[in-house]
Amino acid sequence: MARLALHYIPTNSILHRWDPRCKLIGLIIITASLLNSRISLLILNSFLLSFTFLLARLSLKKVLKDLRSFIILISLIFLFQILLSPGQRIGFLPISKEGLVIGISVAWRLFILIGFAVTFTSITRPKELRDAIIWFLKPFPFIPGRRIGLMISLAMKFLSRILDQAEEVRLANRARFGEFCKNPFKKIKFLTLPILRRSILDAEEVTFSLATRGYNEDHPLEVNRLNLIHLTPIFILLGLIILFY
């Protein structure tokens, strides 16, 4: 595997053994709390993110290396916020105090959100995510839960696959001295076209595989009962968020 970020990493950690339905609930709660820019909640979520990284046994250095493109994007968003936001200017600098506060808040929340997304994908198999979504949507007969669960799990799988393909294409282009090309349009062309072609072929292969295996949404799916012990961290998380809100 060329990358660690946004991939499932098989490890015998306590978070890997946690019920996937509780993982999904926890992710939803944390995402909802990030809608509020209160500094206490940001500090709490930062601490929780560091704690989950330790429990999931993730290498922070390797993850940051894999996410360098996202880091550059967030840095650009921060730069635009501090330069374009109106407000009282700081001395002779072309930035405002309000823009600086908004920029830090937005960048901080994006870093936390991406960090939890990386943690969630590293400890949850796509199959587990599919079963969790089907379990949540089972009480609603008018919603095709099995189809939605399959699509989300496939999207999660394809995302990691596309990232691997992008890394392979980049290394192949580098081996052919493509990095010396000064034309940015040619660089984009040599990167996007192979990835697009491979993605279409992978999607076609998955479609044929589902058809040959007789995929049927009416086929019964057995999901283990939810152990109440796994809900304990959810209640602790809710209590911490209410306390720091």
Image (spheres, grey):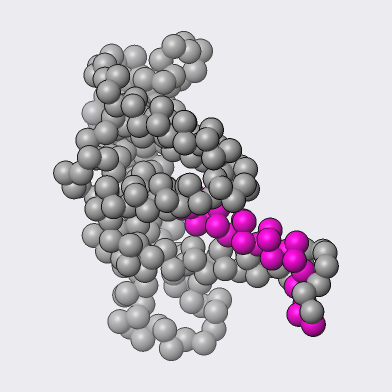
Which corner quadrant holds the N terminus?
bottom left
Which corner quadrant holds the C terminus?
top right
When the figure is inspected, residue 163 is found, relative to residue 9, above or below; the finding is below
State the residue at coordinates (47%, 86%): 181
Dominant secondary structure of the magenta stretch? helix
Residue 208 image point, x, y percent? 30, 37
Q: Which residues are magenta?
A: 92-114
Image mark count: 0
When the figure is inspected, residue 115 is found, relative to residue 17, above or below; the finding is below
Note whether residue 6 is visible. Answer: no
Q: Is residue 176 magenta?
A: no
Residue 100 image point, x, y percent? 69, 65
Residue 148 image point, x, y percent? 44, 28
State the residue at coordinates (22%, 40%): 14
The reply, left or right, for residue 148 in relation to residue 165 is right
- Residue at the left extreme, as displayed: 12
The reply, left or right, for residue 245 in relation to residue 163 is right
The one of 123 and 1 positioned closer to us in this rendering: 123
Residue 54 image point, x, y percent? 28, 52
